[in-house]
Amino acid sequence: MSKITLITGASRGLGFATAKALGGPDHHIIAVARTVGGLEELDDAVKSAGGSATLVPLDITDETGLQNLGKSIFERWGHLDNFVHCAAHAAPLAPVGHIAPKDFDRVWAVNARATQRLVTMFDPLLKSAPNGHAVHCHDPHPEAKFAGAYRTSKLAALNIIESWQAESTQTGPKISIFTPQPMPTALRARFFPGEDRSTLTATDTQALRLLSLLNS
């Protein structure tokens, strides 16, 4: 029986690479992202590997959408074997005193608040699996200057996951934190325009590292 694996941020970057690497007969991928074209490309890759996917075009800040997704997973499968959280949002670079309120609110909504809401929706489904496992991708930005909104929102998300991890020690599910090496993603390009991307680690390579953690 295929494991049910949900991946956020699955239309590009590490989320896409991880979903593609898992795409085979052993996993049914629930791919969550806003970009429909990227999800359709992923679906083709998963099918070519003999796997199957459910595409969910969804903004993870959509509370009703998350509730409906959790309900649909429960009604169809009754559990969730794996949850890999790769989705993230990068606010425009700006000095702390000049961060636009709408940019600050958006980055916190995606990176911090949505992380807590995802835990709320999927913790019961993971506990219903024999060995439920969640992997949170933490991306600490190496430069503090001009990235205050992103850094603080990602640190808040990390603290949420660490609390969930501590609270789940006895009851499950298993919670892991994955810190990828710098990758040539669109998100990183927001912080490092003009960077020599040939020096960075391919997303496919980091996806294999993530899968080793997921399977541990």
Image (spheres, grey):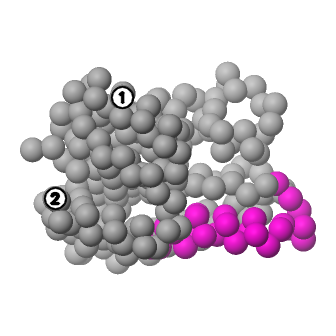
Q: Secondary structure at mark 2?
A: loop
Please name the residue shown 63% across and 32% down the image: 184
Q: Position of residue 148 (x, y in %)?
A: 77, 63
Q: Is residue 104 above or below residue 8?
A: below
Mark number, residue 44: 1
Q: Residue at x 68, y 42 (%)?
A: 188
Residue 77: which numbered mark, if any? 2
Residue type pointed to by label 2: Trp
Residue at point 70% right, 60% down?
A: 150
Residue 213, position in %: x, y? 35, 45
Q: Tell me residue 214's x, y (percent).
A: 32, 47
Q: Is residue 155 visible?
A: no
Local SS, label 1: helix
Q: CA distance from mark 2 to mark 1?
A: 23 Å
The x and y percentages for residue 190 are 75, 44
Q: Which residues are magenta?
A: 93-118
